[in-house]
Image (cartoon, coloured by chain):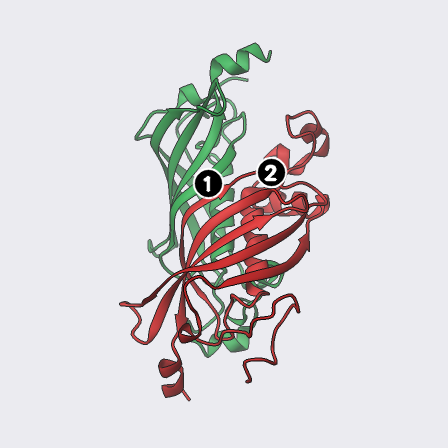
Chain colours: A red, B green
């Protein structure tokens, strides 16, 4: 695969990274946009976070939020989608290790349009997986009013070029 | 509401906490069980983490995992469901603040049955919301082989009894 032919959402001018070796600390990737609906908020929450501020429109209207708000785990999942569809995600795939210091900074509401910015913060060879590297990516998502709703440092394992070459 | 009449999954012998005041550091809550299917793994991932080790059975069979594995965000969402259905969640609802140090410790596969244990680790009055408190809950999920798959310190805001009383 070429490194210039496979951008997936058309929003970034950077080529798609293939391997751990292709990242630099300080690189910034912008995501596409994702609009969240009330139906999606309620459907996610019925399955994974069945609390009435996420599932019951009438109840939610009487809270301080004045309407349905998304489960924080839903906001995290939407940010992951924006990550996978962006050039911050490698063609080789990303194995999640964990998250350091996630914060939900503001509610996400029905109709919100989210965009995320991903900044490469740390790069280190993996001790556990020789030939792979650990990428620390600072993910920040904002709504259409430019209010930050989500902020997290995600850690993931990505294969290196030499490791991949020995796999053919 | 009584404090003994509304346990939601029948697995815990503890009464359902109503307010911040009802928690103690060191309290442990056991969740019910949740079985995850390959269909659910793929459906979640098509929407939120479209990488082939989560969505493509044939691709996944050829990886080191030997089959579909759940998106880490899916495992987190399932753990949230186990939390909400357990007595670690209050009748008043839980407003997520964030997560400190989340780790995905082992893959979650089709057919796995997950259970979580929630330990109250920190309790502090909220500065931002007078009358509310911040509860730090250590969430650990294990599969049917007793292998830990998920480990996170979750921070949430819960109303205090006095605050709730002034709201009628």
What element does badge 2 sit on? Answer: loop
Q: Mark on residue B98?
A: 1
- Identity of the residue furthest to the left in this view: A127
Characterize the local packing of mark 1: few (<14), some (14-19) or many (20 or more) Cα atoms within 10 angstroms.
many
- The answer to whether residue A67 is left or right of residue A92 is right
Residue B41 in view (yes/no): no
- Numbered disc 1: secondary structure: strand
Given the current orientation, which residue lies at the most extreme bottom position?
Answer: A168
**Above or below: residue A20 compared with residue A99:** below
Q: Quadrant of residue A136?
A: bottom left
CB atoms at circles 2 and 1 under 8 Å apart?
no
- The one nearer the camera, B1 or B157, is B157
Instruction: From the top left corner, tell me how far across and down residue A61 is, in percent.
Output: 71, 29
Residue A94's tag is none
Residue B159 sits above or below residue B162 on the image: below
Dot 1 falls on which chain? Answer: B
Residue B85 percent across, percent down from the top left: 51, 37
Q: Is residue A100 visible?
A: yes
- Name the residue carrying label 2: A107
Residue B117: x %, y % from top left: 37, 41
Q: Quadrant of the N terminus of chain B?
A: top right
Within 10 Å of disc 2 (Cα), the crowding (few <14, some 14-19, many 20+) is: some
Residue beneath the point at 67% across and 40% down: A109
């Amino acid at each position: 695969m070429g490194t210039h032919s496979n951008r997936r959402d058309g929003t970034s001018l950077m080529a798609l990274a293939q391997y751990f070796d292709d990242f630099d600390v300080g690189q910034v990737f912008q995501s596409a946009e994702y609009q969240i609906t009330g139906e999606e908020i309620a459907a996610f929450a019925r399955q994974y976070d069945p609390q009435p501020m996420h599932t019951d429109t009438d109840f939610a209207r009487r809270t301080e939020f004045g309407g349905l708000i998304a489960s924080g785990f839903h906001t995290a999942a939407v940010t992951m989608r924006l990550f996978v569809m962006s050039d911050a995600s490698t063609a080789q795939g990303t194995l999640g290790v964990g998250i350091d210091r996630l914060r939900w900074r503001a509610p996400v509401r029905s109709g919100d349009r989210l965009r995320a910015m991903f900044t490469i913060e740390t790069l280190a060879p993996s001790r556990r997986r020789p030939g792979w590297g650990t990428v620390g990516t600072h993910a920040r998502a904002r709504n259409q009013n430019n209010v930050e709703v989500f902020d997290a440092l995600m850690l993931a394992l990505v294969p290196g070029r030499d490791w991949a070459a020995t796999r053919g």
